Image (cartoon, grey):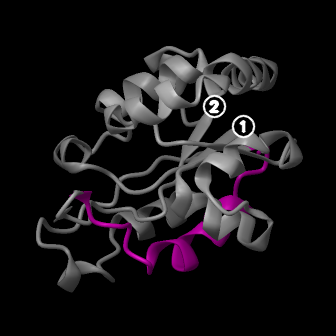
């Protein structure tokens, strides 16, 4: 696993497409119990090199019911984005994750997680990649049908503050999905 993580950290496959430079951000350990598959690092995470080191990460840890020490212990959580580097700014937020990362690195990373018990699919990119034709028509519908993907996957919306409107419109998520998520994480830990 250490060799693989070093290879990912040294990856430059997308360098010509990354205006802000290459800085793969992820974490994993062969004993990781939960894989968090999200989109791609944002600009803050790109600068710090610490996964989920922003307001989205604060909300995600709240959703999981864990503190920073638990979250950043790679024996607990493998943090594997769809794109390992910050893709840059687009017209209405960050650009999509680079498409090269997941096909190149996810399979060997996940194969090295000997104790994996749950995979969180955060956002539409992760859900499309991992659920394929089993995902629903929309992210909302996929998250609503979360029970049909358990015990392997649990699809979630992105915890970004940009999704406050979605969270307000979909109160069932807070009432139904978050308690299931917290129970699942507590059981695994």
In what element is the residue under mark 1?
A: loop
> What residue is rendered at 88% in x and 47% in y?
148
In the rendered view, would you say 70 is above or below 4?
above
- What percent of the width, then of the height, locates residue 115? 79, 43
Check disc 1 and report the residue beneath it: 33
**Residue 49 falls within the magenta-colored stretch:** no
The quadrant in which residue 154 appears is top right
In which quadrant will I find the C terminus? Answer: top right
Mark 2 and mark 1 in contact? Answer it, CB < 8 Å.
yes
Q: Is residue 120 visible?
A: no
Nearest to N terminus: mark 2 or mark 1: 1
In the rendered view, would you say 10 is above or below 46?
below
In the rendered view, would you say 167 is above or below 93?
above
Q: Is residue 19 visible?
A: yes
> What residue is rendered at 48% in x and 25% in y?
168
The quadrant in which residue 31 appears is top right
Look at the image and give the residue range highlighted in magenta: 93-118
- What percent of the width, then of the height, locates residue 3? 51, 64
In this rendered view, identify the residue nearer to me: 79 or 130: 130
Check disc 2 and report the residue beneath it: 76
The quadrant in which residue 44 appears is top left
Q: Residues within 10 Å of mark 2 (few under 14, many from 20)?
A: many
> What residue is rendered at 19% in x and 85% in y?
16
**Residue 104 falls within the magenta-colored stretch:** yes
In this rendered view, identify the residue nearer to me: 58 or 14: 58
């Amino acid at each position: 696993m250490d060799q693989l993580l070093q290879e990912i950290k040294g990856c430059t496959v997308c360098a010509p497409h990354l205006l802000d430079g290459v800085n793969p951000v992820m974490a994993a350990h062969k004993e990781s119990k939960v894989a968090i598959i999200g989109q791609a690092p944002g600009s803050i995470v790109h600068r710090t090199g610490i996964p989920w080191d922003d307001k989205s990460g604060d909300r995600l840890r709240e959703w999981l019911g864990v503190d920073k020490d638990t979250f950043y212990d790679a024996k607990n959580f493998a943090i594997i984005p769809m794109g390992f580097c910050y893709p840059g700014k687009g017209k209405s937020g960050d650009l999509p994750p680079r498409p090269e990362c997941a096909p190149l690195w996810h399979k060997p990373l996940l194969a090295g997680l000997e104790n994996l018990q749950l995979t969180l699919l955060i956002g539409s990119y992760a859900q499309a990649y991992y659920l394929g034709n089993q995902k629903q028509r929309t992210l909302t519908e996929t998250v609503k049908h979360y029970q049909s993907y358990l015990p392997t996957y649990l699809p979630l919306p992105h915890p970004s503050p940009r999704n406050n409107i979605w969270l307000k419109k979909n109160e069932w998520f807070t009432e139904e999905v978050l308690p299931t998520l917290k129970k699942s994480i507590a059981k695994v830990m």
